[in-house]
Image: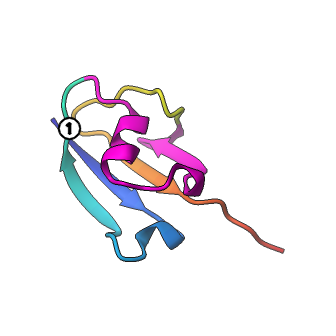
Amino acid sequence: MIVNVKLFATLRINRFSEKKIEVMPKTTIIELIKGLELPLEQVNIIFVNGRHAKPETELKDGDEVAIFPPIGGG
């Protein structure tokens, strides 16, 4: 199955901003993140199809996954 992954801010550096990725059925978000070799400590917010998602959420074909690092402001 195919999911569309979007990386934001510092997670894009030397990677990609958006990419379609093939994953196995029942793949979780945490498995996707590990497969992309993203440092877990740099992942803070995850959305699937515009809704906040937990790392153990199972992905479905066609899901859009947005991954954000910690964001600061002031």
Residue 27: give x, y in percent of width and height.
29, 29
Q: Which residue is mark 1?
A: 23
Q: Residue at x 30, y 46 (%)?
A: 35
Outermost right residue: 74
Question: On screen, 70 above or below 10?
Answer: above
Q: Residues within 10 Å of mark 1 (few under 14, many from 20)?
A: some
Residue 6: give x, y in percent of width and height.
37, 58
Which of 52 and 13 lies nearest the eye of the viewer?
Answer: 13
Residue 23: give x, y in percent of width and height.
20, 38
Quadrant of the image for the N terminus? top left
Left or right: 10 with respect to 65? Answer: right
Mark 1: which amino acid? Val
Residue 34: give x, y in percent of width and height.
38, 45
Q: Quadrant of residue 30?
A: top left
Question: On screen, 61 above or below 8?
Answer: above
Magenta highlight range:
26-52
Quadrant of the image for the C terminus? bottom right
